[in-house]
Image: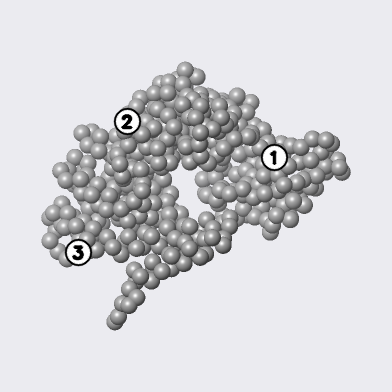
Amino acid sequence: MGSSDQIEKALVAWAQSCFGADAGVSSLKRLSGGASQETWAFDLIRAGSVDKLILRRAPGGGSAARNSEAIGLATEARLLGAAGAAGVPVPRVVHVSPAGSALGEAFIMERVEGETIARKILRDQVFETARPALAAQCGKALAGIHAMPVDTLPALPVSRGRDQIEKYETIFRGFDLPRPVFELAFRWLKDNAPEPLPAVLVHGDFRLGNLIVGPDGLNSVLDWELAHLGDPREDLAWLCVNSWRFGQSERRVGGFGYLEDLLGAYAAAGGATVKTQDIDWWEILGSLKWGVMCMIMYSSFKTNADPSVERAAIGRRVSETEIDLINLLEGKSGHA
Amino acid sequence: MHDAPSARELVAAVKAFIDDTAIPQLTGHSAFHARVASNALATVIRELDQRPVSEAEEIARLQDLLGDRSTASATHLNAQLCSAIRSGDVSLATPGVLSHLKSTTIAQLSIDQPGYSGLSKPHE
């Protein structure tokens, strides 16, 4: 199941049912990345035109175990539609396919030009103009996402800072692997939690890798599968987590920009005025969450659910988040 | 028991095979996983070289911090430290805690990911 031939056959059937017997599909290619979803690029050929499209599909077409937090592809497609209508740069969805269909649980969207690979965006000369503009563009996009009226959205999980501390602490304790740095971070986060802001739509994974960037900057916001209702500062700080600076630590925002640009553009576009110390708190939570997520990925090796070298090796990235937590907590020892 | 070749030599030989023979013949996902495998073996080599000394130093610091002179393992001492943090007996403000954890984490990262950006403290 899920072979390239079967997918191409199902895509051709979709193309012909929508656009007539002359429509066809070419250049189908599995793209790298996307551990929890399959992503394929293909061209739709019809009456003298070519549409460059992306198929986003549940692994094997559905039914496979996936991240328990993921909202499902149909909900993700609805969020993309709502975000586009709200003026957030996102790909236009052209088709949603239910589980059990020939294509499997999936949706098809337009293929937006640009780059997603963080190291290229941060280093290649073609993005020289984009990089200094990107922090403000991200601030504006996040303000747009956080302003989307919650009552018009599909049902989403609610997850605030306290919920996340509790959730990740439970998972961490379940592993029974003593990590004093994580212990200290959980304790500090609980003792210093800022008052929650009113719940908004949170993207949940807004960072390089999930953003399409062109020579002028942000073209599109992808990968909405971790969207939930929660605190807007989560998204702003997640973009600052050192793991998502991809080696360019001196630029706090994603390895490309500065916090004042992000927060300034966020407020100018209607977002809340956010204090730096609250970003610190959420960034500490973000590093801690990513550390526990690395432990989760390692445990899928340990339990033989995914006995790959890659899942084993990721367990040796937990210490990256420990040094990030120490660097962040070093400035906070007076508050403990 | 003999050690010719030693564990380190065997691992280094397998890593050289992956790097010099296997990877040039692989493409796509297989090439990616082979590079991950090679990096994992580099971690094993660093661990064989560094862990005995780093762990002995960690244990000595933990014994000082916890006032525990027993022959407990690093895992056991770390579990003790975790309990003390949970109960509030040890916090961020406890002298020596953060510097101990920093030394331990730097030693761990020197094995796990010696090129990681967090080792040189970020600004801002």
Residue A33 vertical position relative to residue A123 in the rendered view, above or below: below
Q: Quadrant of the C terminus of chain B?
A: top left
Residue A254 in view (yes/no): yes
Residue B90 in view (yes/no): no
Q: Which mark is residue A53?
A: 1
Q: Quadrant of the N terminus of chain B?
A: bottom left
Residue A230 vertical position relative to residue B23 in the rendered view, above or below: above
What is the spatial separation of the Cα atoms under label 3 and label 1, in whole angstroms? 59 Å
Question: Which residue is located at x 60 percent, y 44 percent?
Answer: A72
At mark 1, the secondary structure is strand
Give the image location of residue A282, x and y in percent.
Answer: 38, 35
Q: Quadrant of residue B61?
A: bottom left
Q: What residue is shown with label 2? A: B124
The residue type indicated by label 3 comes to Ala
At mark 2, the secondary structure is loop
The residue type indicated by label 2 comes to Glu
Please give the chain letter of the residue carrying mark 3: B
- Mark nearest the camera among 3 and 2 is 2
Give the image location of residue A89, x and y in percent.
Answer: 59, 28
- Extreme residue toward the right, this view: A21
Q: Earlier in the sequence, mark 3 or mark 2?
A: 3
At mark 3, the secondary structure is loop
Residue B15 vertical position relative to residue B102 in the rendered view, above or below: below
Q: What residue is shown with label 3? A: B72
Please give the chain letter of the residue carrying mark 1: A
